[in-house]
Structure formats: structure tokens, C-alpha cells
Amino acid sequence: MVGWGALLTVIGGPVLLMTWVRTPWVTLEGERVDQPVAFDHRHHVRDDGIDCRYCHYDAERSAHAGMPETAVCMGCHSQVWTESPLLEPVRRSWFERSPIRWRHVTLVPDFVYFDHHVHVRSGVPCERCHGRVDLMASVYQATPMDMGFCLDCHRDPERHFDVPRGLDVHPPVHCTGCHR
Amino acid sequence: MNDTDPHLGLVPSTSLTRRRFLLGSSLVALGAEACSKPPRDDLIPYVQRPRDVIPGAATFYATTATRDAYGFGLLVESHEGRPTKIEGHPEHPASLGATGPREQAAIYSLYDPERAKAVRRRGAASSWSAFEFAMRAKESAPWSARGGEGLAVLLEPSTSLVAEARLDALRERFPEARVHFHAERSAIDRLEGARLAFGEPFDAVYSLDGADVVLSLDADLSGGGAMAVPMARAFFAKRRVESPRDGLPRLYAVETALGLTGAAADHRLAVPPGELPRVARSIANAILAALGDRTSPLAAALAAEASRESEPAFVRAAARDLVQARGRAVVLVGDRQPPDVHALGHALNALLGAFDHVVRVTRSPILEAGAPSHDVRPLLAALDAGAIDTLCVLGSNPGYSLPGDARVRERFGRAREVIHLGEHADETSALASWQLPAAHFLEAWGDARAMDGTSSVVQPLVVPLWGGRTVAEVLAALHGAAVRDSRRLLRDVFERRNVDFEDAVARGVVPHTDTLRPRAPSVDLAAVAAGLVARPSSPPTVTLAVAPHPVLHDGDLANNAWLQEMPEPVTKLVWGHALLVGPSTAASLGVRDGDAVEVASGERAVRLAAFVQPGHAEGAVTAWLGHGRRAPSLAASAGGADLAALRRLDAPWIVEPVTVRKIAGKERVIVTQTSADQHGRVAALRSTLDAWRADPAAFRQANEDPASILPERLSGSPQWGMAIDLAACTGCSACVVACQAENNVPVVGPADSALFRTMHWLRIDRYYGGTPAEPEVDLQPMLCQHCEKAPCEYVCPVNATVHSPDGLNEMVYNRCVGTRYCSNNCPYKVRRFNFYSHDDDLPESLRMAMNPGVTVRARGVMEKCTYCVQRIRRTEIDARVARRALRDGEIRTACEQVCPTEAIVFGDVSDPRSRVSELHRSPRAYAALGDVGTRPRTRYLARITNPGPEPSR
């Protein structure tokens, strides 16, 4: 009996642990995140037809996609919905010159040096990793964002998105490609 | 031994018991840290984004540091307004894109947690406005009603036009105010020598690409001098011979302690410091004799003294070669030499035809160069006479650095008010009634001029972290200036000179502002002869040579942990100080490394650790400035002794006679390298030109890869590799600190340094050959060789070190469990183990120095050189985004970029046309320890020296 118990612990323990770290409890997939502003992507993307990169414009030129500064919000909202109570935190930020503290939704561990602009320029669509943000009332993490998720695509990009014609996409699958 | 170190925020080694360590490590294992996501944090965008800033991308701004008051152009990398890394400014004549260790370490100084953080009035918190008010009120500033009578300002020498404008305004408002300049490492004697020779205090700039024979009289070819980078680059470029048919320049060096110039020299003469002027005269006499001049006043003056029995072979050989290479020969004189030796150097350069192509001169850009205001003694006399009501010390630390007979403590006490502007609470601020925090140069607006006159801009990278102000701003407060804003004053000063201000700020360097004269004025040989100071031949006693520390200089950067932990290039001493003693002097004293010795002059004595230094002149001992600090600080934790008690104002660099005796006890000596022997292995190879000509294939075997049974795995392009030219490496160690800054390498402190736990990814090995009296010195940068058959990879049980397809030996911190097998199996010993989480307890300000592109390692993992993989991947991504191929030389590692002599070249070894491939094919190329079959990707190029034929007696 002791032998079986030990075997179960020795094999079952790690197996359980390794399964557990892949569940949404750890990857935080789909977890609801309350934001300081009730920003609705459905309205901005679908109703207004604004491209992702209008606000997240660093995605094409920097490692970070960037959260839009208050000035970007106020570009429109100094003209439209100027008295909406939903936009009160944005106006306060603008007039008090204090930034809006958004909650971080899409979490990648610190030891990963993910770079947005090389992915965008290689033709990876935003929704491949971020999901259909245009259908989300409030944004949640749509994919596991663990190493397996990254490597699936890095090993065989053609299977995961339409690689632009004429672009030789061969993503790194060795350690220092992402960890430095 | 210093166990606890509150100044470093380090875990003291002794407080961590085995039980606590085991407890901690098992908790880490249970926590399964590697599997979990980071906690959900906030994303904080700007309200309105500043111009130029792209979050996640580095921005570079041009600014200027100073070396001994002269400008040194820099480009500073900034991440979202946080400066993290310093590079040289390629367009600046003093930098040429490279820097030294001091410039690299300026980032630490900026974030130094021990900086002065507030205005203090007699120790109590105060404010800048209170200070300004006090300077305007009649009762607190009585000198303001008397035209400045009773006000004295003591500054560091400066080349700044803004400071000049402020001083002019101060003098206009207060014509009776005294202004003095003082620094321990100063240009006074050099400029005084130039005045003897030319009639004016000229600065001389040397273009060593035109020199085939160089004689250094205690000069510093590779260290921290104002123009050291262009000099070293030009000289060592000529030492990098391509084939045995080429010639290479010859270097003669005279010095007391073994320095990097002596280490690079083909012939070196070690003499006590008091003897050096006599050697200079002997060489001058021999040169004049060879030139057939026996009648001129100079020849007569020299011959009168040259009647000594036999001159060393060195003197005759140097004179012979200098005369033979007339027109391509030059004499360099070190800053510590007295004026008449400098004048003699100019005279020799004139006689050897070096002016106008090898040596060019300009009116010195140092403010009030050659004026009596550079002598501090009249100020001390005025203090004695009670003529000074308010003494304003701006920038320097005379309370520590002035020699003991200046009696600073007593004399400063005679002034009613002492105002001190400084970056730290130090020995001078302890004497001050107003303690003002100084702005770091990365927080300041201003300007500086290089030795050739080129003007450049000091531009702030951040607002002052602790509300510090610059010297010019405090001067403005003293004279109640209308324009307070330094940026505006700089713009006014530049626009008066028709300089486009915005363009100057963007470029950093103001183009076409050098003032070098096309033709030097002739040297007045009669004046040089008349200026020669007769010196009694040295009595047979021991002389103490006082030298600025090669890294910390006079101690102004002693609070910099990066520099304290940077091994001194020759001795490899860290965190401290020692008395350097030649081998036979040491034998006669009966001392060994670490024995306590007492150096006494009269009744004053200091206690130091003895350190036996091969090649040190006998009959003299050397000690450095910068140690024995009294103010509680990191600098003080380095220990050592303050030499002020022994030094005198009129001869700050020589104390004689002294008695040195062994006393009971030991003193701390921490070295990072204990063996200086290559044990016959292929490590740092060298040959002479003649021997190489006889056997041009001498290094070929060491460059061939032994057969291997291991599979060939690396193919495709690119394949990264490196070449390091030992003929060009001066050992200056800029790369060591550059690597530390770029790769977030932690500081371990003195206690762990003593256990050989320093974390540097790149070290410089120093080997001695020859004899202890006349050692041959080899210096070899040693870093991960990125072996194709890497021994570390085969022994790692968890695949934490693996190979990338482009030939990098990768280190995966998250896999590492800290067995340290890899380090045991590494023949180069370049892997470092984190015994502690060095960065956990780091003060908040020092965290701002971290490079965001590199992981900060935790306790229990191995780390080592990555060939700056973050730079490789960054550039690859940029090229990929721009849809273009990588260019050769586009990716530069931190060590390559900083190197003053371009000794390090990184690139793609699979491209036969790349620079690194060319160097790997050089007949001097070889693999260090290649015989063990590692196939290192880093190849060294052997050093070729050019000693002359032994002169006949």
C-alpha cells in the first residue's frame, strides 16, 4: 500500500501540478478585470470603426503596444460625449494632469521579452493573441499566453495565421529569442 | 573584515546561517515561482506624451561629461526619461564614440542613494530659497555691501563658457571677491611648463598616428586623461600589425609604479619619482648630443648635470630611437611632473620635429589658465589673516583632498560662513554652515570644451532627483543674477558666439569650434634651459610616490560601488588601498601582501597594507589618493588610509624622505586574481616582431580546431563570434564597467569580493612574465567564449545552458537550479553564481539604473556573458521590421562599443567578408585554451611587441 501511495505521489503529484499550471486558474484566461473607466471596445471598434492601432499606435514601432494617453481619449471626447458621466475619470485625468491607472489584462511573465512591432509587421493579426476584443464589453485575456501557446505558433506560423505573401517568416524557437 | 555593509544594502555574509539558507531555498521550491504569472499590476499611460518618447524604446541624448575639466562628449540611453547607459559621442574629439570606466559608472553616481538630498543649514533642514534670501540680506552677507570684500569662491577648474559668464558677472558685481580654482589632479604644472616653453599656457594635443617612437615620462596613454581615447586609439591602431612585414611603433616608458602605459611599453624604466626629472634630462642630453648640439644654452645646462657615471642603457636606446625617427618621434610628459620637465618635453618635441603634425597646440580652454587664481595658497593665507567672511566651496572636496599642511579644518573655521556645494555629505560639508546638494551632470544644463577647444553641450537627462543645482546656478544666487535659468544662460552665451543653440543641443558637439593652431609658436630653448630646476641627487632613502588612484582618481568617485568593485587594472585590487612595494624593497622590509606597514615622515605616519608589486621602482613606494574617507559612506567602507597627513602643498606627489617599517598585524587586501602565471597554457600569447618575422606561422597551430567526436550542429547564417586584439587592449577596464551597466551585473561588496564572488561577466586577466624586477605584463579580457563544443552544456542536468542556432551559448535563468556543474567544467572560469539575490535590497534609486532589456537575476542561478544578446535580438527585430538585411558592425556589444582602442570586434563569422571573419583569419589569431577542444567563438589576436636591439654598453 505504501508503495502505491508513494508511486502515486511521485508521479501523480507532478502530473497534477503540471496540469494545474495550464488551467485558467493560473493562466488567468477569461478572468474579469474591472477597469477605472467603463471602456467598451465593441462600441469603439464596431460602431465607430476605429482601428486597434489608432489608440494602441506604438504596436507598430515599439515592443509595447502602449496604452493610449489621456490626450488620445480627449482628442474625440473634448468634442463628443463631453458631459457623459462615464467619461468623468477621463476628464478628471486630463484636467488634473494625473494618469488613468488601467488594470493590466494580458499578462506575460517578466522574463519574456515580447515585442509587438515585429509581430505586427510579420502579419500576426491582433486577435490571434488578444481574441476578438471587438466583441468584448470589457477586455479579458482570451488565450493562455503561456510558453506552449507562443511556441505552437512559432514552430508553424502558417497554420495559425495568414502569413503575408513574400514575407519569409521564421520565428525563433530557441531560448534567447524571447528570454534575455 | 567588514561584515555588514549598510551602504550597499547587501545581505551580510555572516548573518545567513545554514539553517536560514535551507529554510529559504525550500520555500522557494514550494512556491513553484517559475510557473506563476506576475501579479496583476497597473498600466499607467501618460496624460500627454512628451516629445521623442516611445514607451519601450530607448532614446539617446547627447551630453558632455568632464575629465579634469575638459569636455568629453557622450550619448546617453534613456528609457521613458530614465537614463540607463552611457556611450561615447562619435563626433566628439575626446570620445570618438568610446568612453572610460568613469563615464560608464556615472550612471551609478546619478542614482547613488547616498547623494546629498537637501539644503542644510548648520545640519538642520533648510531650502534653496532660504539660502538665496541669506545671500541677499545685509546681515548674513556683509560682503555684498563692500563690493564682495570678504567673499571667496573656491571652484574646480572649468572650461565652461557658462561658468565663465557667471564668474564675469560675479566679478562685475563684487570686484573685491576672491575667486580660486583647485583640483588635486590639475593642469597647473603642465600649463606652467608650456608657459616656460612657449611664453603662453598652451594645451598640447598629440596625434600619435604620426608617431613611430614614443617616449612616455610618467604619461598616461590609456587611462583617464582628457585626450586619452584619441591618443590610445591612434597609437594602438598602429600596433595591430597585419603581417610580419609591417613595422610597428616603439614605446618607451619611464614610471614609478607599474602602470598600463608601462605594461604596454616595449622598454620600461622604473625609477623613484624624484629621479624621473633627472632621467628626462639624461635623455634630453643624449638627444642633443646625437643632434650635434653641444653649445646651445639648453645643451650647456643639461651637460652640466649629465656628468654622472653611467647612464642606463634605456636612456641611450630611447635617445637613439627618438633621434633616428626624427619627425615621427614624440615625448609625452605626465601631469604630475614639475613644470620644467613639461617645458623640457616641449623643447625635445621641437628638436625632434614633432610640432604641427604629431603635436599641435592651442590656448588652453581652462578658465583663467595660467593665472594666479589656480594657486590655492593665497586663499589659505587670506583665511589665516581673517580676511574671509564667507567661503564658498563649489564642487570639490578640499576638506579631504588638500594636503595636511593646508590645515583645512582649522583655516575653514576662521570664516564666518562656509558654503559647500557637493554631491555628497563629505569631509568638506562637515565643515560647512550651508550644505547645498549639487546637481549631477546628467541633471544639468551647461557646456564644456575639449582640450582642442571643441565646445559641447551639457544637457540634462532627468530633472534633478534631489533638487541639486549646478555651480553656475549657485554663482547666480551669489550675485543675484537676473537670468537664473541655466538653459537660457547657455542659449545666450551660444548665441553671442553665433552658435545655433537648438542644433548644438541636438548634436551635442558644436561643429568647427576647435582652436588648434596650424603652426605652433617656436619653443624658447633658452627659457627652457633657464627654467630647469636643480635637484639634489636623491639621498639613499625611501620616497613615497603619491598617485591618484587609477580608477577613483582623487576620491571624487570613491562613493561609486561599480568603480570600487572594478579591479584596479594592474594590481587587481578592489575595495581598498595598499602600499605598493617593489619586490626587493619588500624583501628587505620583510613584508608580504597584506602585512601592515607604517609609512612615516617626521612624526606623522599612516598605516597601510603592503602589496608587493612586480616592476615597482626600488627605493620608492607608492600609495593612492581616494581612500581613508572619514564621512560615513560607501567610500569609507572601502577603508585604506588618507595620505593627507604626509602630503605637503608645495610637493603634493612626492613625500621624501619617509621611513617604511613593518608593524604588527594585517590589513585588508582584496584581489580578484591570485595567480599571475600562465602555466605554459595558451592564454595570452605574445611575441616580439623579430621572433614573429622568423616564424610567421607561430600562432597557426593555436588557431586550428582539434578533431572532435561531437556532432557538428551549427550551420546557417548568421553565426556570431568575436575577436579581441591583445595588441590593442590596454587593460583600461572600460569594458568591465560597460558590461556591468548594460547587463545589470550586481555589486557584491568587499566581504564577498574577498571570497572571489564578484559577478563581472567580463574580467581582465593580468599575467606576469619576465622577472619580478622587470615583468612582462599581459592583459587579456576574458568573457564567455561561446564555445561551439561548450563543456558547460554537457554537464547541466536541467538543460539550463544550451546552444542557439546562431552560435550563442545561451543561459536560461528559469531552468537553472544552481548545481554549478557548468562553472566547474568551464575552462575559462567565466560563469558567475548568484549566492544572494543581490538586487532584492537595492535602494529604490539604484533600481532606476537597471537596463529594462535584461533580466535581473535571482539567488541561486548561474549567469555569464551573453554576447549582449538583448542588443543582437533588438537589432535583428529592427532590421526585420525595416525588411532589410543586418549590416556588418551594426550590432555592437557593450564591451565593443566602449573600447577606446577598438580592440573588441563582434560580428557574423559565417560571412567571410565581415570584420570579425577577417580578424579570425589573421596570422595572429588563436583560440585561448583551444587545445581542450572547446572551439571558442571568441578568438584572440596575439600581441606583438617591438623591443629594440640591446644597446651595447
Image (cartoon, coloured by chain):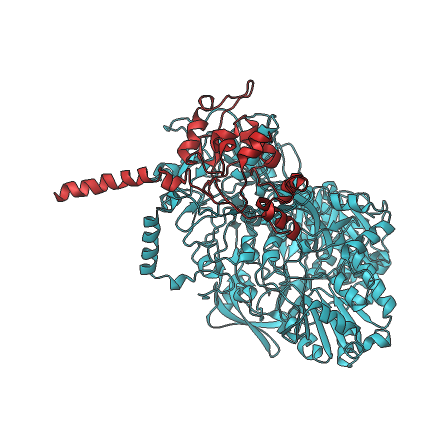
- Above or below, B433 against B67 in this view is below
Picture coordinates of residue B321, whole percent (x, y):
71, 45
Q: Is residue B181 left or right of B495 when viewed as pictured?
A: left
Q: Is residue A177 left or right of B386 when viewed as pictured?
A: left
Can you name the residue that lies furthest to the left here? A1
Q: Quadrant of the N terminus of chain A?
A: top left
Q: In the picture, residue B881 is in which quadrant?
A: top right
- B364 and A72: which is toward the camera: A72
Seen at 45% across and 28% down, the residue is A154
Chain displayed in red: A
Q: Examine the rendering and report whether any part of residue B646 can be seen.
A: no
Chain B tint as drawn: cyan
- B866 and B500: which is toward the camera: B500
- B777 and A7: which is toward the camera: A7
* Labels in figure, total: 0
Picture coordinates of residue B657, whole percent (x, y):
63, 72
Q: Is residue A26 left or right of B604 when viewed as pictured?
A: left
Picture coordinates of residue A48, whole percent (x, y):
60, 31
Q: Examine the rendering and report whether any part of residue B844 can be seen.
A: yes
Can you name the residue that lies furthest to the top here? A165
Picture coordinates of residue B713, whole percent (x, y):
42, 27
- B251 and B379: which is toward the camera: B379
Q: In the picture, residue B722 is in which quadrant?
A: top right
Seen at 23% across and 41% down, the residue is A10
